[in-house]
Structures are given as C-alpha cells and as structure tokens.
Amino acid sequence: MRPDGPAPSEVGQNSLPMGPGRPNSPWTASATHVFEQIISTPAADYQITLGGTLDSFNTASYTTTDNVKTMMESPWFQPDRFLILANVGTVDVLCPRVVINGRRNWHSADDLLDSIIWPGMSDRAKAFALFRFFSRFDVQAHNNNLRVDDVMPDLNAAPGSNSFRERADPIKAVNSYYPSGCILSAANLVIMARHAGLNARLLAAAPLVGPFDKHGGAEIEYEGAYHYFDPEARTFFLDRDNEKVASYEEIHRDPALVLRTHAHGFAAQECKGAFIMLYREHFPPYEVPVEQWVHHMDLRLRPGEELVYRWDNSGKYRYGSNPRNTPGPPYRLANGLLRFCPNLRNSGYRGGIVHEVNTMISEPDTNVALLRPLISNHPASVTWKIESPYPIVGGRVFGKFVMEAEGGCSVSVSIGDSWRQVWKKEGAGVFHVEADIDSVLNALTSPAIYYYYVRFDFGTTGQPSAVGLDSVRLESDLQMSQTSLPALSVGRNNVSVRMRSPGRPVDGLRLRVSHGWVECAGAAPPAAPLHAVLPEDGGSVRAANLTELVWADDEVDDIADHHVLVSSRPDFLLPVSPNFDRFAFSAVPRWKVARSFLRPGLRYYWKVRARNVEGVWSQWSPTWTFTVVG
C-alpha cells in the first residue's frame, strides 16, 4: 500500500521543516541525508536506498567484556543518526512502529515470537530457534557490573514482587537493556518458550539452600524430555549420541560433555569447561520462580508529540538496584527522546491532559495568553501525563507564562504520591520556563519509570484574561538498546510502518516519519568465499579423513579472518554443536573440524564469510554440502 501524501524524496538537512517539536539539535544536524514521509493510513510501506558500502551490519566487531566474556561492539561505521515518528495530525496515533527489512520486530511477545519461529516447526526446532535468538550477540552481553537491578528475585516475596522482573522480561530486555547475566538471559528464554507453548524452567546451578546466583540456565521440554540451554554462555551440550541436547541431570552425571563443547559464542577464542564444577557439584538444581513477564512497546502519540530514535546517547541510563559494583554506562546505550508540544491554540489540547482546573482558551486573534484562568482569585492549573514504553531516564520542562498583571506561576512534577516544585515565579512579566527534572526522576538508582506528571499552575487577583500559559514543551530522555533500533543497511531497504487501526478511516491522521543518516564508501566488503575445496560441494567423505574444511577466497591478500558455520539443516537453524559455529581466527581459508561430533550417513551444510583487514565482513558464501560416510 502506498502511503498517502507527497512522493518519497530526499531533502537536505536545512530543508527540514522547523517549528514546534522540531528544534535543531546535534543529532539532527549530523545527518547528511534525510527521507521524510507523511502517512495517513494505519499501514504503509516504502523504500529507502542507502548508498555507500558500509553499514552497522557489515562492520560489526566483537570484544571481551569486563567479565571475560564476548560481546558485539558498536560498529565502526553506523550510518543511522535518527528516526523520528511525529504526530502532525489532529488525532492520536496509536502504537506506531517501524520495521526495516523485517528485522527487529520486537514490539510485543507475539511479534517477537513471530520473528523467531514459524508455522509447522517441531517443538525441538522451536527450542533451537528460541535459544539461537537469546544467545545472539546483539541481544545480550554478559557483564554483572552493568546489568540492571537484582541478580535474583526476592525469594521471600511473591515471584512478581521484585525488581528482577524488569530485566527478566524479554521485551524490556531486547528493547531497553543490553547487558545481562546468566539468570536474566535464561529467564528471557524460559518466558518466551512458555509463550510459544513449551514447558520450560529456569534453573540455578547452586546449592538448594542458596546462594542462588552461581550460574543459571534454562531447560525446555520437547520429545518427552527436558533439554538444557545456556544462552549467556551461548552453548548447549550434546549427549554422547551427538544428536540429543543433554538435560541438566545428564550434564551432572557426565561433566565431560561440558569439556568437549565450545562456550561463549563464535567470537570467543577456544573456551571449554564453562561452569563445569557447578554442574558437577549441584544436583538437583534450584528452580528459580518466574512468571510470564511480558511487556509491550505500545505508545500513544498525541497531536504535537513525537518519538525520536537516536543512535547516540547523552549518558543517561538506569542502574537500579544492582548490588555488584559501581555503575557504568551500558553497552550499546541509545538515548531516545519523547517530545510533546501540545497546541494551546485550540481545544484539541484537552485530549492530552489528565486534569485541569479553572482554565479556558482565549478568544482567537487576541493579544493575551492562550490558556488563562476562567475566574480570578482562584488557582488555575493544567496537568499532563507523560508515558513511554521505554524507561524514562531524564527530562526537561519548557514553557512560557504571560503575566500582564501581578500573579504567580509555577511548575511541579510527580512520579509518585507527591508533587515536587521545579520552577516558580511571582510578579508581572513574560516568564520562560526551563527546568531540568533529572534530579526529580533520579533514574540511575530508582525503580524503572514509565510515566510521570507535569503540572502548570498560574493565577492572579486581577483580571483573569491578563495572565496565562502561552506554550508548553515536555521532553523525556528514554533508555533504549541500540541493537533494537530500526536500522538501515547498504542498498535498498523495505520500510514497513504500522499503527493500530480503529477499523475505519480516520480524518486527521498524519504521522510524519523522518529518517536521517550518513553514507560512507571509505572501505568495501570483500567478496564472499568462492567455492568449497575440501570436501567438494556435494561430495562424500569418511569421518576419519575429514580433518579440516577448505575453501577458496577471491581476495586472498585482503582477508584477515573467517567465520565458519556447519549445520545438519539447510536453514542453519542451529550448528551441529557450538563447536561448529566459530571464527577461524585466521586469514588462511581452512578450518580444523571437530570430527567427533559428525555422524555417518548424514548430510551437512556449511558456509563461510570473510572479514578483511579493514574490519568489513563479506556476504555469506553459497551453501555447500558434504555427506559423512562410515
């Protein structure tokens, strides 16, 4: 469906329409390309072409965390600068979302599940797909010091009565928080497995009398048995048949299963034996209580309100009640912005407030303030509620009072049961409000904030028409995970914009979508590896003779590393074992095979991608196959 409004076009940054809700800022000025679209239907699709050769996907790199684990760093080239969803119409925009190239549609538990599994999947395949998602480098990175809130639930309280649920909720986890821990990432997997209709449980490899924060993983039931997955260590352990994923009990009885299995993902150097002593020592494991904690990213944009996705940050974030260490900014932190400029020039502003006392709009074309008291000698006030599906971690209040008679005016903020005054003036004159409310929110260590209230008070003993509120702008800083943002990639991008449909045409529905980015051709990706050398594509090989995989590169002198993936499935749903999804850590186009995991009679699928000396990844090679014979 083609969106209503002008045809897509790219305009220079200086051509961006300014006015309420669109002040200049460093993050808008940094974009060299801007694409804007006005959408007046609940569903619209369009395309954007990103030029150059580099994006955040082909320049991703990996490093070691403070906990000696691996994580995905910010790419060395990030083209996106901002994405703005602005309600420039006269009715509310309900639940707007943007999905680019089908990626990162994580708006709700159902959306997330639809992006992970598909109809007709077996329970085993569903478990594999869910584990693959929650062990992804762009979804979680282990760092105890940087994760949010408690390490474990408050076991003396009901399961839902603790701050553990904030980060254990998979929707909040992927959209707002990036650093995690073993118990938290396993809880995300368990909750989504249950949402998919599977039995799952969260296990702590710890003594039954505590403490319970030693190590955590997830067991998912399929084919009549439980199977153990560890998303934080990005590993699972095959039983001795090299086919079945072992249960926790089987790992406890045969700890050597751990010793033979790679941990911490494809970017980690050789790492085996992860947490083996805990598995060996503790049985039965402690089952950690979790409920079906699933958030959603629904948002109502009122007329004059806009949501800004930003790929940079101003250093504002939540640390919560994490007892581990001093706080630090999370990996891949992005500070979004929710900006609200209600139009006080017509009665439509009342759709955005929760309470008003003794107020009225002045007659059009008068020179007095726009929102004024109805009668004098009585206080006038108007209160707005700010709500966000992302944690609110900072904010500012702006406004303008016109006091042509003696009187008083003030601004107060509430995030709980009481009000705190953040600005006040008395007398006559034109008073401009500019109040930072970070100290009121106290987001660093407070429980997560998803709404707050702002109240403007004003009054006079003189003529009521002589004083009033002339303009308002409310800005809220949001905590987002950069890896969740709708990102462009080199080439043609298919953009899908969706809003909740009321089931009928809506007059006044106008959502302005603005993409801002830069382009770079300072380096080029290498060509994908050319063809399989050993074994030959489609060939057969004896397991005893298969010591390495060999392929041919096109640009041998420019290659720095390779990533090899081998699976028993053509869709590469999961590798043969974690040992078969690895960086080669070598420019040489060959890779040593862990032969003990390969089974005679099976066909295997493999592919390779290359990274050049400038740190840019190629596309994956074609899929090659070989069959193992006895």
Image (tube, rainbow, N blue to C red):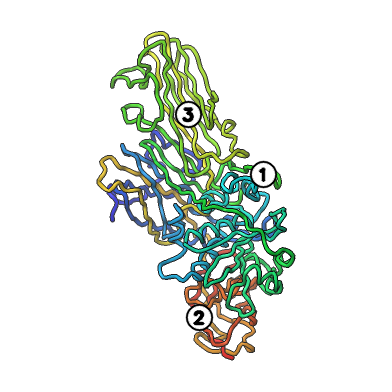
Amino acid type at image mark 1 = Pro
Taking 597 as reference, is 490 above or below it? above
> Does 247 sit left or right of 426 as displayed?
right
Mark 1, Cα crowd under 10 Å, few <14 / some 14-19 / many 20+, is: some
Toward the top, the furthest residue is 462
Residue 593: tell me if it is visible: no
The answer to which of 509 and 297 lies nearer the viewer is 297
Amino acid type at image mark 3 = Val
Q: Label 1 belongs to which residue?
A: 327
> Does 155 sit left or right of 57 as displayed?
right
Q: Label 2 belongs to which residue?
A: 624
Q: Name the N-terminal-most of marks 3 and 2.
A: 3
**Pointers 2 and 1 in contact (CB under 8 A)?**
no
In percent of width and height, residue 232 lies at: 62, 60
Q: Quadrant of residue 401?
A: top left
Q: Label 3 belongs to which residue?
A: 454
Amino acid type at image mark 2 = Trp
